Image: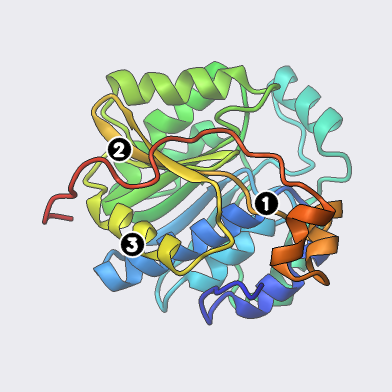
Amino acid sequence: MNVSVSPSASAYWRSRAEVEGAFWDIDFRLFDEVLTAQKSLGVSGDLLEIGALYGKSTILLGLHAAAGEVVQVCDVFEQETGDSANNAENESSYPGLARDKFEANYRRFVDTDPRVIQELSTSIARHVEPGTLRFAHVDGGHLFETVVDDLRNVKPLLAEGGIIVIDDFRALHTPGVAAAAWAEVVDGGLVPFALSEQKMYASWGPTDAYARHLDAWLQRSPDVENFGYQDVKGHTVLIMENPQRPTTVRGRIGRWVPPALMPLLLPNRPGPHLGTRTRPRELGSGS
């Protein structure tokens, strides 16, 4: 099945497997749609990535950066820090992490270099002006205190209409991210409007315009089969399961077999129930 992505991202979409890193297809497409929506909504500003790894998601930010917008990357890369827990995680989870590898990947797809801040994210407010970001992807340290600091520091940096994406908000090895993210939802005014299996898409400002854009996107994305809407603290949240990938047995068979025959050859296991299939409440007329 053909997948529709923006013209800015189409060449990278076809070559995405060539860049190492964990960036699921559903999140590639959600980044693409949200960044595209910001252009149509007139939301402008720089783009920030805390924790770039090998650049897989940062490349997509670079492809969406308009003239005058800067992609800013905060990562320690191979540099030792004074944080022993951070060093231990990098050594265990990200062997071979190096700035030159990130930059080589990035330059394959994006003509303009990012601004690299090779420091711990605790210093981010010294490098980014308040109210200048339209998009921030937080994928740095996973300890509770680190994520709390990242959320606290990023909030004033966002422009009007800016959003934050929080990675690993539900993974087994990242309970600190989950605790920090949901605490900010409960007590800090953060409003999630979409959840994938790995990432929370949210804002401290209005989210209806983004929700409308994603609802329309779902209508033209029949491969996103398992999704639903749930209310969380008075906010309707779109929840999506990653579409079947061609690297799985079912995905490989599905490339050659008509859809009508698939249930006979390989019965499909139902995915988790993610909520109602239609948005349970009307969106407001505001942004």
Q: Residue at x 31, y 32 (%)?
A: 190
Specify the amino acid type for callout 3: His
Query: Could you say where residue 39 lies in the image, as x and y percent from the top left?
Result: 34, 71
Q: Nearer the viewer, mark 2 or mark 1?
A: 2
Q: Nearer the viewer, mark 1 or mark 3?
A: 3
Q: Residue at x 79, y 58 (%)?
A: 251
Specify the amino acid type for callout 2: Thr
Q: Are marks 2 and 1 in contact (CB under 8 Å)?
A: no
SS class of the residue under badge 2? strand
Chain-order first, disc 2 or disc 3: 3
Using the rendered image of the protein, determine whether residue 100 is visible from the camera's viewpoint. Answer: no
In the picture provided, is 171 more to the left or to the right than 284? right
In the picture provided, is 161 more to the left or to the right than 181? left
Most foreground residue, 183 or 67:
183
Q: Which mark is residue 23?
A: 1
Q: Which mark is residue 213?
A: 3
SS class of the residue under badge 1? loop
Q: Residue at x 78, y 64 (%)?
A: 254
In the picture provided, is 146 more to the left or to the right than 141? left
Most foreground residue, 230 or 139:
230
Query: Could you say where residue 267 lies in the image, as x and y percent from the top left?
Result: 76, 47
Quickly name the residue at label 2. Answer: 236
Q: Residue at x 51, y 76 (%)?
A: 6
